[in-house]
Image (spheres, rainbow, N blue to C red):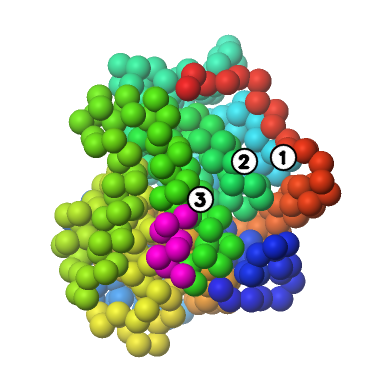
């Protein structure tokens, strides 16, 4: 994991904490994906991806600032809420989602989440979890919208239990099916472990994810949802085992990755895919330029998978950014990203919040990161 100036070393951990990296990559990937051009294609030729990324270096092209999608818009709301409330506050976060959508509705929001966001804007709403719970005949959404904005929870909280709890609650504001919110938990855990330097040992990284997700998916609600949706028990764990199998193969085609892991809008078909992209690109790959670093390889490979490109690249970018550090992000990529300066500021503020929680934990007290939650969603 890259060490950069002004970053503190985590107590008890081998890695340096780089808040800028995960925030920058998670915020920027959706923009770099040129979602309107690449999103939805079953697969995107690598030469087309590389042509686009190389074009970002050409200042004479006049492409200007690439606007971010709903992924970044909602992630920024999560960050702003965590900072404003010094912890998780479901009403504050839900309100920010609604306001952001009303001010910039053209970011590429899905039809389902738009219905939820409009209901969250009502001043008469008492239970902010209810609109999401009412979707799809009460089943709730299992999309990846909660996972795409989960990275800040790993940047704000130091304890795994808190990361799991608050990433789940944050996702449940729009995605109340366990196959949706557990995808957010998996994504947040992946960013957390990456910040700890766990990607230095890829097999151990996957093992730790499996260990945590076995507990998460062992809950009765998760088992019930899996049965109702005709999924095997422990569906995310099953996908992580597929990730391990793909890692062990000498040659893996993009078609195989799409077939076995998916590239769609369901959390189950995209979060494990993003994790695989990061792991696969830890080493140089034949189809990618030799001068590319690991983060650049991850971004290019994620985009070449097609499908829900902006979200998969957003999630892979957050995990990879936490590992490689901000210096691994090309300056040209940073220059073309809308809101990059704000990401810098928010990253430093999140680091302060994280360090505060870490210090409280090290002091020997039982103090928890602040939660202003007044509503407990049904388990």
Disc 3 designates what residue?
189
State if disc 3 and disc 2 touch (CB < 8 Å).
no
Q: CA distance from mark 2 to mark 3?
A: 11 Å
Q: Position of residue 251 (x, y in %)?
A: 19, 74
Q: CA distance from mark 2 to mark 1?
A: 8 Å
Horizontal arrangement in the rendering, residue 248 relative to residue 109 (left or right) = left
Front one among 6 and 329: 6
Disc 2 designates what residue?
162
Name the N-terminal-most of marks 2 and 1: 2
State if disc 1 and disc 3 touch (CB < 8 Å).
no
- Residue 237 visible in rendering: yes
Q: Position of residue 275 (x, y in %)?
A: 38, 58
Q: Position of residue 369 (x, y in %)?
A: 72, 39
Q: For numbered disc 2, what is the local secondary structure? A: helix
Front one among 193 and 354: 193
Q: What residue appears at the point 66 percent right and 20 percent down from the top-left corner?
A: 374
Q: Position of residue 95 (x, y in %)?
A: 59, 29
Query: Is residue 207 located in the magenta-colored stretch of the structure?
Result: yes
State if disc 1 and disc 2 touch (CB < 8 Å).
yes
Disc 1 designates what residue?
369
Name the N-terminal-most of marks 3 and 1: 3
Q: Quadrant of the N terminus?
A: bottom right
User: Height in image: 357 above or below 32?
Assistant: above
Q: CA distance from mark 3 to mark 1?
A: 17 Å
Other residues around mark 1 within 10 Å, as few (<14) / some (14–19) / many (≥20): many
- The stretch in magenta equals 201-208
User: Height in image: 169 above or below 341?
Assistant: above
Q: What residue appears at the point 71 percent right and 68 percent down from the top-left corner?
A: 9
Front one among 78 and 121: 78
Q: For numbered disc 3, what is the local secondary structure? A: helix
């Amino acid at each position: 994991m890259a060490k950069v100036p002004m970053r503190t070393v985590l107590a008890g951990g081998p890695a340096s904490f780089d808040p800028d990296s995960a925030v920058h990559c998670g915020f920027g990937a959706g923009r770099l994906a040129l979602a309107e051009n690449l999103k939805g294609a079953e697969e995107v030729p690598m030469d087309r991806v590389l042509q686009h990324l190389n074009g970002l270096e050409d200042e004479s092209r006049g492409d200007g600032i690439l606007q971010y999608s709903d992924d970044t818009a909602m992630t920024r709301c999560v960050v702003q809420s965590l900072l404003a409330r010094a912890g998780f506050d479901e009403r504050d976060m839900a309100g920010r989602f609604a306001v952001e959508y009303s001010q910039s509705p053209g970011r590429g929001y899905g039809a389902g989440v738009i219905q939820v966001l409009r209901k969250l804007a009502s001043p008469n709403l008492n239970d902010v979890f209810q609109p999401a719970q009412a979707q799809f005949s009460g089943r709730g959404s299992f999309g990846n919208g909660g996972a795409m904005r989960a990275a800040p929870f790993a940047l704000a909280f130091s304890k795994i239990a808190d990361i799991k709890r608050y990433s789940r609650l944050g996702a449940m504001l729009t995605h109340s099916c366990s196959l949706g919110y557990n995808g957010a938990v998996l994504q947040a855990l992946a960013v957390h472990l990456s910040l700890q330097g766990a990607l230095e040992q890829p097999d151990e990284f996957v093992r730790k994810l499996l260990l945590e997700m076995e507990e998460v998916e062992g809950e009765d609600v998760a088992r019930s949802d899996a049965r109702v949706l005709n999924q095997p028990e422990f569906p995310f764990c099953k996908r992580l085992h597929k990730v391990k199998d793909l890692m062990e193969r000498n040659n893996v085609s993009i078609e195989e990755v799409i077939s076995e892991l998916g590239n769609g809008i369901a959390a189950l078909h995209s979060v494990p895919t993003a994790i695989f992209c990061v792991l696969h690109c830890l080493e140089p790959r034949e189809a990618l330029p030799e001068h590319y670093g690991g983060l650049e390889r991850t971004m290019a490979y994620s985009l070449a998978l097609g499908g829900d490109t902006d979200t998969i690249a957003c999630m892979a970018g957050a995990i990879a950014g936490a590992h490689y550090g901000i210096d691994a992000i090309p300056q040209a990529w940073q220059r073309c990203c809308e809101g990059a300066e704000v990401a810098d500021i928010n990253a430093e503020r999140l680091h302060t919040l994280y360090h505060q929680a870490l210090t409280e934990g090290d002091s020997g007290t039982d103090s928890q990161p602040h939660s202003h939650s007044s509503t407990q969603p049904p388990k």
